[in-house]
Image (tube, rainbow, N blue to C red):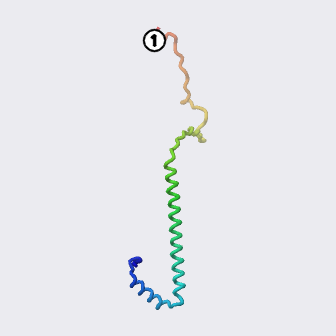
């Protein structure tokens, strides 16, 4: 019997030392406390594993779904206080009248 690298003779020595140090009245209480601590650790470990599995499944689900691409309309330009909605003189384009006898037109 080998638990955590400790054989039967070593476990017997540890039990005898614990009995001498704590006494027969305290050993059951210490054993219960130790058992509760180990159980709490196991519960926390189990809960961590469950959360880890849930997150892994959620990531796999997200990866397996195809991505959808959506185009959004361009955002409206917000005019500042110095800008106006009316075009300035530099932005106004006036049409140029062409003569009927223009040399650029074949005729």
| Label 1: element kind | loop
Vertical order, 2 against 99 (above or below): below
Label 1 sits on residue: 103
- The structure residue drawn at horizontal position 57% and vertical position 38%, both measured from the top left corner, is 73
The spot of residue 37 in percent (x, y) is 52, 76
Q: Quadrant of residue 89?
A: top right
Vertical order, 74 against 25 (above or below): above
In the image, 98 versus 59, the foreground residue is 59
Q: Quadrant of residue 81?
A: top right
Q: Residues within 10 Å of mark 1 (few under 14, many from 20)?
A: few
The spot of residue 77 in percent (x, y) is 58, 39
Q: Give the side of residue 84 with respect to residue 13, left or right.
A: right
Vertical order, 45 against 32 (above or below): above
- The structure residue drawn at horizontal position 51% and vertical position 80%, both measured from the top left corner, is 34
- The structure residue drawn at horizontal position 49% and vertical position 48%, both measured from the top left corner, is 64
The spot of residue 50 in percent (x, y) is 52, 62
In the image, 80 versus 17, the foreground residue is 17
- The structure residue drawn at horizontal position 42% and vertical position 83%, both measured from the top left corner, is 11
In the image, 18 versus 8, the foreground residue is 8
Quadrant of the image containing the N terminus: bottom left
């Amino acid at each position: 019997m080998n638990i955590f690298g400790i054989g039967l003779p070593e476990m017997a020595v540890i039990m005898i030392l614990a009995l001498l140090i704590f006494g027969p009245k305290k050993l059951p209480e210490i054993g219960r406390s130790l058992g509760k601590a180990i159980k709490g650790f196991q519960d926390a470990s189990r809960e961590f594993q469950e959360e880890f599995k849930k997150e892994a499944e959620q990531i796999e689900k997200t990866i397996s779904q195809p991505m959808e691409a959506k185009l959004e309309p361009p955002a409206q330009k917000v005019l500042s206080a110095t800008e106006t909605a009316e075009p300035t003189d530099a932005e106004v384009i006036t049409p140029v009248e062409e003569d009927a006898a223009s040399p650029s037109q074949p005729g």
